[in-house]
Amino acid sequence: MNKSSAFKQLGINTRDASGHIKSSRDLFGEVSGQLSKMKDGAEKTGITIEIFGKNATQLTEVLRGGKAAFDESTAAT
């Protein structure tokens, strides 16, 4: 699996309607939203590691909370 197929597996397009790459913030929100809908397991772990790298486990709590948790955690920035 590669990053492109990981995003596709989550149903996420990395480009906007104009063909520009979406911002990291937008993509992170979409990814966390989609991952929060998945059951924990090998598939979810594999996708998470493919997108975020080996240190993906450090993001587990934010990813588990979905897009709303991500938006809340970044509201102050």
Image: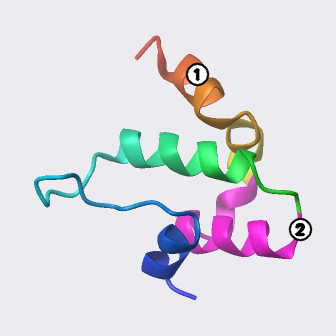
Q: Quadrant of residue 56?
A: bottom right
Q: Position of residue 27 (x, y in %)?
A: 41, 49
Point out which mark residue 25 bears: none
Q: Which residue is situated farthest in the bottom direction here?
A: 1
Q: Position of residue 74 (x, y in %)?
A: 49, 22
Q: Which residue is situated farthest in the top direction here?
A: 76
Bounds of the magenta segment: 41-57
The quarter of the rendered structure image containing the N terminus is: bottom right
The amino acid marked with disc number 2 is Gly
The amino acid marked with disc number 1 is Ser
Residue bearing mark 1: 73
The quarter of the rendered structure image containing the C terminus is: top left
Point out which mark residue 41 bears: 2
Q: Quadrant of residue 67?
A: top right
Secondary structure under the numbered disc 1 in the rendered image: helix
Secondary structure under the numbered disc 2 in the rendered image: loop
Q: Main secondary structure of the magenta part?
A: helix
Camera-side residue of 55 and 29: 29
Q: Nearer the viewer, mark 1 or mark 2?
A: 2
Colour convention? rainbow
Residue 44 belongs to the span the image colors magenta: yes
Q: Quadrant of residue 72?
A: top right
Relative to 56, residue 9 above or below? below
User: Sequence order check: which comes first, mark 1 or mark 2?
Assistant: 2
The residue under the point 33% across, 61% down is 14
The residue under the point 58% across, 21% down is 73
For residue 10, side relative to residue 23 (left or right): right
Relative to 50, residue 76 above or below? above
Relative to 25, residue 6 above or below? below
Q: Which residue is situated farthest in the left direction here?
A: 18
Q: Position of residue 32 (x, y in %)?
A: 61, 45
For residue 23, side relative to residue 19 (left or right): right
